[in-house]
Image (spheres, grey):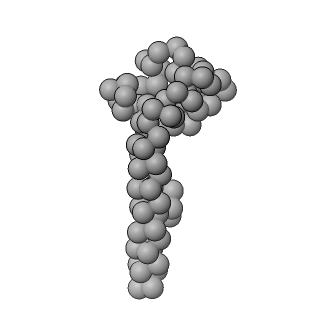
């Protein structure tokens, strides 16, 4: 998410070659440079899943089913898995 933001939210397919092909040195540089932002994303995801689980438990207590379970995803062409496994595509 941090790299995508740095790349003006462009699709990963438009990123520089070294990012597109996950150059280990470049990614480590980015990790170091953006460590605070990465940790912020991790924390926010942790809080989200805590709140989501509380909401789901509350809803289930009243026999309300939430469709989607824990796997709410916003699907778009440049999702993380496409980027991460680009060598497979």
Tell me which residue sits at (41%, 80%) in the image: 58
- Residue 89 versus residue 8: which sits nearer the camera? 8
Q: From the viewer's perspective, is 45 left or right of 85?
A: left
Whether residue 44 is situated above or below residue 10 in the rendered picture: below
Front position in the image: 23 or 74: 23
Quarter of the image for residue 88 reads top right
Q: Is residue 25 above or below residue 34?
A: above
Image location of residue 12, percent across then percent down: 46, 25
From this viewpoint, which residue is outermost toward the top?
A: 17
* Image: 17 above or below 7: above
Query: Is there any visible trace of residue 7 in the rendered image?
Result: yes
Q: How many marks?
A: 0
Quadrant of the rendering where the N terminus is positioned: top left
Q: Using residue 9 as the reference point, say whether residue 27 is left or right of it.
A: right
Q: Report the residue at 41% width, 85% height from top.
A: 62
In the displayed orientation, state which residue is furthest to the right: 88
Residue 19 higher or lower than 41, as above or below = above
The one of 52 and 62 positioned closer to us in this rendering: 52
Q: Is residue 20 left or right of residue 65?
A: right
Q: Position of residue 60 (x, y in %)?
A: 46, 80
């Amino acid at each position: 998410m941090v790299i995508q933001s740095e790349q003006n939210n462009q699709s990963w397919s438009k990123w520089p070659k070294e990012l597109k092909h996950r150059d280990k040195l470049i990614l480590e540089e980015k990790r170091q440079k953006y460590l605070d932002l990465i940790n912020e994303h991790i924390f926010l995801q942790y809080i989200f899943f805590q709140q989501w689980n509380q909401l789901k438990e509350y809803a289930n207590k009243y026999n309300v089913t939430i469709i989607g379970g824990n796997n709410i995803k916003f699907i778009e062409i440049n999702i993380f898995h496409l980027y991460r496994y680009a060598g497979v595509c």
